[in-house]
Image (cartoon, grey):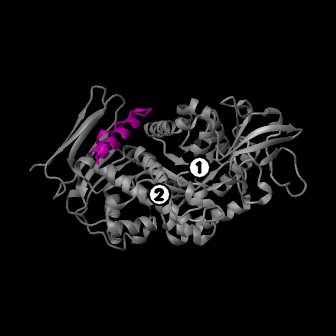
Amino acid sequence: MAQSLQLFTAPNGSFSSVTHSGNTHAHLPSFKLSFSTPPNSFAFSLRPSTSSLPRRHVSTADWSPTSIEVDAVTEAELRENGFRSTRRTKLVCTVGPATCGFEQLEALAVGGMNVARINMCHGTREWHREVIQRVRRLNDDKGFAVAIMMDTEGSEIHMGDLGGASSAKAEDGEIWTFSVRAFDSTLPEHTVNVNYEGFAEDVKVGDELLVDGGMVRFEVIGKIGPDVKCLCTDPGLLLPRANLTFWRNGSLVRERNSMLPTISSKDWLDIDFGIAEGVDFIAISFVKSAEVIHHLRSYIAARSPNSDVALIAKIESIDSLKNLEEIIQASDAAMVARGDLGAQIPLEQVPSAQQRIVELCRQLNKPVIVASQLLESMIEYPTPTRAEVADVSEAVKQGADALMLSGESAMGQYPEKALAVLRSVSLRIERWWREQKYHETIEHPSIGTSFSENISEEICNSAAKMANNLEVDALFVYTKTGCMASLLSRCRPDCPIFAFTTTPSVRRRLNLQWGLIPFRLSFSDDMESNLNKTFSLLKARNLIKSGDLVIAVSDMFQSIQVMNVP
């Protein structure tokens, strides 16, 4: 049957549909779709690509297999199980005392960790520097591409460090003292420091005090100078530097929190540290408005003009929800920090807030991480509850780019098992998602702000639709900035996306986005040369084989190519 590919345009000049007829997969001729973009119009042409013509011989002297870099675990999965086996949802692990050694970090990387998170609420900068160096050595020595995320503490009200103890157990009916005093010696028994000097003045007898989003609850029963006496009403584990919120007459008391700066003086020092260490992401806690992100971005540009660190807005307060769209629009990514968010809004509203955040991030093409208490029970137990598995499944079905472990990997007894649960559940739900063909019903609004951006967006939308309709084995995208790779990820195609980039930092950042398998590859502006080189290198490593069907796009010039691997 003759092959045909048709592209229809709407009256406003945008693409409306792509259709293809003919025998897919078997001996498919290669086509190239190219665009020219004069100021007020565009034209396209469809012709056989030179990729379908006899190719010149590519010698191993020209292209060495070692000149392409891909994550070692992904490479093994591709070799063993093929394209369809790859996990699309990315995994973030918080590094703590349980996982800070080189061998423990390697075990997490082998288990599927894409991003290592360091939490500046805990540990010294020197401790975090050592972790960063170990992750870098892991990437260099073992062939991984683990990105590094630094999470700031924020200036919300929180407890102290418990006098150096890793935790403290609060039992039902016990009287605890929350104090703003500085103790010269060991903390008295059942005493907790609070970082906010006005704490004793602001709380009232009868207020309910929630620790770490309600993991432990107290009732305020008295005040003596700087000390607040509290009765434990819901027992639990107190962790160092846990956030504190207090409720009065069923409502959150937030006047003082709203007056505190989003970025504290300590946060600014930590941000300087992160810039100097070259972290890939900085997560900002308790973002209240887009202005905070704009201010920080300007600061980083002035402080380190060559820095390309990405900014993640943590959505964990009522103010964040009120200004959600502008915050996400200003940020490079977002995190649904459900623990603290659940301390500021009624618990029953957290699931709908999560879905709203995930959907908005997808519409605006910003990666989104679902975090907090995904597998909380695995801090102490080797298997999760069935409710936790259902929670993870729902986040995957909603289309989150990444899932994050906090205490489970930082201080838990079973960090590798917790990561294995996230990995296996993600794989199973993704396979179910593809079987149900959910990609066929999802449409997203245009986000381009210029004609060129609109063309790139439509190319990616078309490429994703073609990939699903033709049942291709993989999408190839050649990108210097990561932009078109991100647009393809937004479409959630049925096949994996091989993202080729020349820059190590871009490659690591792409490791946070759904469905992207980032490669580091030197390439030119000659698409034919790039494809020749890519096919040769990937075939040499047994990652693709002759006859595989791929679609290739590039952000260097606007084109779509459909071809069988020669």
Residue beneath label 1, please?
Answer: 309
In the image: residue 123, left or right of residue 101: right
Q: Answer yes or no: is residue 95 visible.
A: no
Residue beneath label 2, please?
Answer: 422
Considering the numbered disc 1 on the image, is that residue within a helix, a strand or a loop? loop
* Residue sitting at x 56%, y 50%: 373
For disc 1, the neighbor class at 10 Å (few under 14, some 14 to 19, many from 20) is: many
Q: Amino acid at mark 2?
A: Leu
Establish if 240 lies above or below 321.
Answer: below
Considering the numbered disc 2 on the image, is that residue within a helix, a strand or a loop? helix
* Residue 286 locus on image (x, y percent): 64, 40
* Residue 24 locus on image (x, y percent): 17, 53
Residues at badges 2 and 1 in contact (C-beta under 8 Å)?
no
Can residue 448 be found in the magenta stretch? yes
Q: Amino acid at mark 1?
A: Val
For disc 2, the neighbor class at 10 Å (few under 14, some 14 to 19, many from 20) is: many
Establish if 87 lies above or below 400.
Answer: below
Q: What segment carries the magenta color?
A: 436-465
Query: Residue lying furthest front in this view?
Result: 173
Q: Nearer the viewer, mark 2 or mark 1?
A: 2
* Residue 168 locus on image (x, y percent): 73, 56
Q: Nearer the viewer, residue 299 or 50?
A: 299
Going from the N terminus, do you reach mark 2 or mark 1 first? 1
Can residue 348 be found in the magenta stretch? no
In the image: residue 244, left or right of residue 102: right
Query: Residue lying furthest left in this view?
Result: 1
Q: Nearer the viewer, residue 23 or 325?
A: 325
* Residue 475 locus on image (x, y percent): 33, 53
* Residue sitting at x 21%, y 44%: 46
